[in-house]
Image (tube, coloured by chain):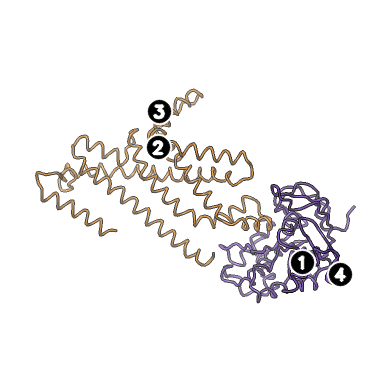
Amino acid sequence: MKNSFAVEIKGLTKSFKDFKALDTIDLNIKHGEKVVICGPSGSGKSTLIRCINGLEDFDEGKISISDNPQKPSKESFVSDFHIGMVFQQFNLFPHLSVIENLKLGPMKSLGLSEKDADTRARKLLERVKIPEQALKKPNQLSGGQQQRVAIARALCMEPKLMLFDEPTSALDPEMISEVLEVIVDLAREGMTMVVVTHEMGFAKKVADRIIFMDGGSIVEQNSPGMFFKKPQTARCKKFLKQILHH
Amino acid sequence: MFRILILFLLFFTLSSCSSPEGTWGWYVIDPSTKAGWTNIKFLVGGFYSTILLSIIAAFLSIFIGLVVALPAMSDNKLLKLFNRVYVEFIRSIPLLPMLFWVFYGLPVILKSMGIDANIDAFWGAIITLAISDSAFTAEIYRAGIQSISKGQTEAAKTIGLNYYQTMRYVIMPQALRRILPPLANQFIYIVKMSAFASVIGMQELTRRANEIVVTEYRPLEIYTLLIFEYLILVLLISFGVRYLEKKLGSNESASS
């Protein structure tokens, strides 16, 4: 029986030595849902989404991706339900040009021909509004442009779910909006996404649900309207106060 | 560099002129005399073996080094242990005892296993040089690969690349630029250490020099020539590596 969840997490627990990074997390994400995760640093936000795509293994619990149980291992995998990821530090391949960065995955892991991969890559560069930078090396681009390339690279694999790990935290302030615009567009097109971010304006605009994490647990979750208007817990209130006063 | 070389040569030539009865006796390798010319031809003939020996040993070492280095980056403790034991063990063995062991000992072991293999001086020297050097190349690979940020491997995973593809298309092309200079150092080291092959009878530069010394009793001139023979080899390698680095380097400046 096919259920309606893209991601189903039950009792997810993970420790780094003595530090409990994730403490029995339960979380279900529907197909097409946009979830924003926020919380103080060290609260387990990044670890949580890194567990979803297998970059991080976990100790206990279960993660099912579109009904397929995820093994607690770091094995990379490509499935019908591919998960794309965008990192805080972009992690573009510096020795490859922009277009080669985009083509590598489709060609090597999906087995697309060079021509098909090129067509797909160029389409995506249009979509993130930097088609003219195709032949440049990543370090010749601004931070905002690099992050848009990284988004395009992830989309090139035609993912069903996109994970964003603080996509704007390493950017200069004037470049944040150009990256967020791309993500907002993506959200409008119906992509399922989980975004770890402190950009509350962005969260208000696109999120179906905002999750507040602290100390490895989900402390609070709510629709954006309720989340900002009526935070339920003291920790969340304090966090919002700090972050919104900036 | 060449100016110093010329100065040296000038010094040696002049000193031989100024003291006819004295310390220098360049006649042993004087190309204008028949005996001198024969000696030179014999000595320089050693280049062939030294170069061939070094190149084959270096290639083997580069290959074995990679095979030994990759397990060091795995999550598997047993594989990691294999890397550590190999590196620590091999790099602690002095070259000369290892050479004796391979040349005189290995055939005995092989025989006891029913393999009648005669290891000649050439292959004995190659095996020894390659294995002894591979511990160092392994460490060079490890340092080079580990200097590439973890984010690169993670990004490769998220676009579905497997281990081999990640190494081949993402990690190694970046690591290679950092690995190349120390690897060139190792190659120079191999060229020089190949002199040890002379003790098991390999007819390379040093062995040939020794043989002429024994018949002519002019160690100073012959070993001086020998030093210059190695100098030429090493300089050639240096130039080659500079050229390679420049080619890769121009690429690097545009990319990292």
Q: Chain of mark 1?
A: A
Give the residue pinned by disc 3.
B104
Distance from disc 4 to disc 1, alpha carbons, whole Å, reads 13 Å
- Counting from the top left corner in percent of width and height, residue A36 is at 78, 65
Give the residue pinned by disc 1.
A239
- Counting from the top left corner in percent of width and height, residue B120 is at 39, 32
Distance from disc 3 to disc 1, alpha carbons, whole Å, reads 74 Å
Give the residue pinned by disc 2.
B95
Q: Amino acid at mark 4?
A: Lys
Give the residue pinned by disc 4.
A230
Seen as rendered, the residue at the extreme left is B21
Q: In front of the other: label 3 or label 1? A: 1
Q: Chain of mark 4?
A: A
- Counting from the top left corner in percent of width and height, residue B28 is at 17, 43
How dense is the environment of label 1, judged by Cα within 10 Å: few (below 14), some, or many (20 and up)?
Answer: some
Residue B189 higher or lower than B102, as above or below: below
Q: Nearer the viewer, residue B83 or A106?
A: B83
How dense is the environment of label 3, judged by Cα within 10 Å: few (below 14), some, or many (20 and up)?
Answer: some
Residue A2 higher or lower than B35, as above or below: below
Q: Residue B198, located in which quarter of the rendered image?
A: top left
What chain is colored orange? B
**Same subunit under labels 2 and 3?**
yes
